[in-house]
Image: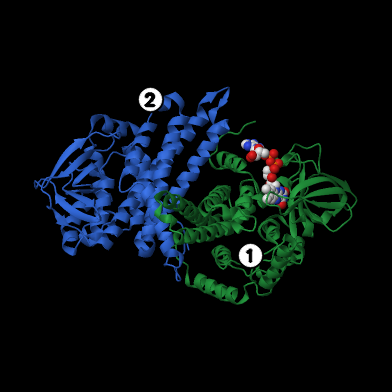
Chain colours: A blue, B green
Amino acid sequence: MNFDFTDDQREIRRTARELLTARSPMERVREAAEEGAYDPSLWQELVELGWPGIAIPEAHGGQGLGVLELVILLEELGYAAAASPLLSNAAAGLLIDAAGSEEQRARLLPGIADGSATATLAFAREDVADLVPDAEAAAHVVLVEDGVATLHAVGDGEIAIEPRETIDPTRRYARVRVTRPGSGESLGAPATLAAGLDRAEIALAAELTGLAQRALDMTLAYVKERRQFGVPVGVFQAVSHRCAQMLLDTEGARSATYFAAWAADADPDSLARGASLAKTAASDAGVHATAAAIQLHGGIGFTWEADVHWLYKRAHLDAAQLGPAREHRRRVARLAVAGAGRSSPAQAAI
Amino acid sequence: MDLTFSPSELAFRDELRGWLAAHHPGPEPEGEAESLEHRIDWQRELAAAGWAAVYWPEEYGGRGATLVESAIFNEELARARAPYPANVLGLVLGGPTLMVHGSQEQRDRYLPPIVTAEEIWCQGFSEPDAGSDLAALKTRAVKVDGGWRVTGQKVWTSFAHRAKWCMLVARSDPEAKKHRGLTYFLMDMEQDGVLVRPLRQITGAAEFNELFLEDVWIPDENVVGGVGNGWAVALTTLMNERAGLAFGLQVALKVLLDELTEIAAERGLLEDESVAERLGDLHVRAEILRLTAYRGLTAQMKYGQPGPEGSLTKWMWSETNQHATELAVELLGPEALATDSPWAFALLRARGNTIEGGTTEILRNIVAERVLGLPRMR
Ligand SMILES: Cc1cc2nc3c(=O)[nH]c(=O)nc-3n(C[C@H](O)[C@H](O)[C@H](O)COP(=O)(O)OP(=O)(O)OC[C@H]3O[C@@H](n4cnc5c(N)ncnc54)[C@H](O)[C@@H]3O)c2cc1C
């Protein structure tokens, strides 16, 4: 039992924090949001570092590391609120790697790993997915409807992609509509598909955890400086207790996300439970902590100028993807019923 | 990161499971006095087999187990629905405090009888005018030849009626500043001048007491951690209370939730989506608490003592336990509110969880000031 990172994993986190602090400070995030486009040089740099393929097997052009290493990167990307298609592409990569056939993996994963043919993924209803991240620039879109995943190649006339503005301009979204019903190639059997979706949920949870931590850090810096009634506002318990709550929520999200990532790599029996824990805890933490950040910044927090709103907006969009927290809560309850009589627990001790 | 148990941890667990299956003490008898005696007997049996204080060194009656094994012990005990050993304040608070601040003589003298439950311990911190603001306490310790004479009043003192030793914090220097003038003593409860009066709780039971002290004698050798250093020693006790207890209690919470889930499933209540969602939410919270407790354990193995982060787990546990018992009585209906229902007791007892061992408001202050570095109110 050891709930800590290895030195290599810590190194990944340190490198990511340093690089993103330098290359994706809030001014860059704002520029990307206001211009409605990602900074291509940042993406180029991430590709050169091999980040898009960090969790993709070496045989398919990736670095062959685990979901845990990807989670470490994504938490940092969330912390930076970086404007980049890395998350959507990596999430689709996890799904295809887990659920795709040998042939599909060999064909699709290399382009995902080196960023030359990216993919993205979303839930659809009646052949329409309302908000698909980074679909316009992607080579492939995976739509999941009623537990069935279908892969569409962009540009083959099977789907129509219309860009849509959302409250989160730091990321590109589009509506994707299947124009030729029944088109596309099917991806994965139900069981492997579920495992792939669970991995994608964990990736979202990691970004949400990073967003929550950033909201907390920005808020702490502000309430230690800002003075009212002759004292820093952080002195007031209504303020400091809300900060403590932000920490509690963020640490909870982090515990769940790391556990889930570990389960994805090492303990398939705990994956479903872990993924739903992570998605629930991180969605709640992300939305609540970023909302608290706006509140605790006062009027300035409500301005376009202050950067806390990017975090709040991103958190809402992330929380809305791949099933809302309420569905994951119900799933946890169902898993608890199923697991109650479990005589020999899964490999995971916790 | 490796969240499995190692072969030796598994062997430890299996040995314990086997032992618990063969030695389970059976259901707790009714009545507080009876139930306490039952748990004292149970602790003796645990101690005789080396299970009462697994994390303690063998020389003091422990098993020399690792922190993880100690976590396993707590989990298995709760899972087997066996009671916690009776001398909880000695095992979780007093013993660990002596291991940090006590002299060799004190450890040799006091630790073994904690393990065997020969000597029960209590914690004399709170006073009528000093609860959250513990350092405002007024109980006076006056230096005399060879020791101290202590006069004052303590309150909410759990197990005082059965205790041999009391971890007593008293004001030894009325001239010194608030936190500086305190000393931590081990007070013999079996002497004239110590009057214990039971206090009835909202559950109807009387776990805690008032303690009246009149010219009580404490010899010099019973000062822990040096005269005037009582605040630091008391903080060690409190951090062990928050971090140490939450670990065992989170498992009890999981057991309670599993039981509730089983009942809800049997009665078809989970088909109601809102019920499934609320129950799922409590499972999420309980599991996150557990995961966070294990993360804290890894950190404690690296850095030694439990840190102020232990306040987070105590806070999470107490609130989740309250919500869980509230949902239980809501789902089970009026029958759960009859006094012979264990759920009724659980509901009421849980209200104390956010008060005992530091109120949630105080824990938030600690997190804000000591973990987040926010400025404090003067
Ligand atoms: C079941 C149980 C067992 C106990 N066992 C023991 C024991 O064995 N030994 C022992 O010494 N004590 C024991 N206690 C006492 C417990 O530690 C105290 O009750 C607790 O520390 C609170 O102190 P108080 O009761 O004086 O409340 P107060 O300090 O008077 O608090 C009243 C309210 O004000 C709030 N408050 C106070 N100060 C602040 C602040 N600075 N900021 C924000 N809010 C604040 C509190 O959170 C609370 O809501 C026990 C209590 C219970 C319920």
Q: Position of residue B149 (x, y in %)?
A: 87, 49
| Residue at the extreme right | B145
**Residue B77 against residue A211 in the figure, above or below:** below
Quadrant of the image where one finds ligand 1: top right
Q: Chain of mark 2?
A: A
Q: Is residue B350 left or right of residue A288?
A: right
Q: Is residue A83 left or right of residue B150?
A: left
Q: Position of residue A95 (x, y in %)?
A: 26, 55
Q: How many marks?
A: 2
Q: Is mark 2 within 8 Å of ligand 1?
A: no
Q: Position of residue B253 (x, y in %)?
A: 54, 57
- Whether residue A287 is visible here, answered yes or no, is yes
Q: Residue at x 55, y 49 (%)?
A: B326
Q: Is residue B133 left or right of residue A87?
A: right
Name which residue type carries label 2: Thr
- Element under label 2? loop
- Whether residue A50 is visible here, answered yes or no, is no
Q: Evaluate if marks 1 and 2 touch, with contact meaning CB atoms under 8 Å apart.
A: no
Q: Residue at x 42, y 67 (%)?
A: A347
Q: Nearer the viewer, residue B12 or A286?
A: A286
Q: Chain of mark 1?
A: B
- Element under label 1? loop
| Residue at the extreme top | A229
Foreground disc of the pair 1, 2? 1
> Which mark is drawn over residue A264?
none
**Marks 1/2: CA–CA distance:** 56 Å
Name which residue type carries label 1: Pro
According to the picture, the residue beneath numbered tag 1 turns out to be B83
Q: Residue at x 38, y 25 (%)?
A: A303
According to the picture, the residue beneath numbered tag 2 turns out to be A303
Q: Quadrant of residue A299?
A: top left
> Quick one: label 1, few (<14), some, or many (20+) residues within 10 Å?
some
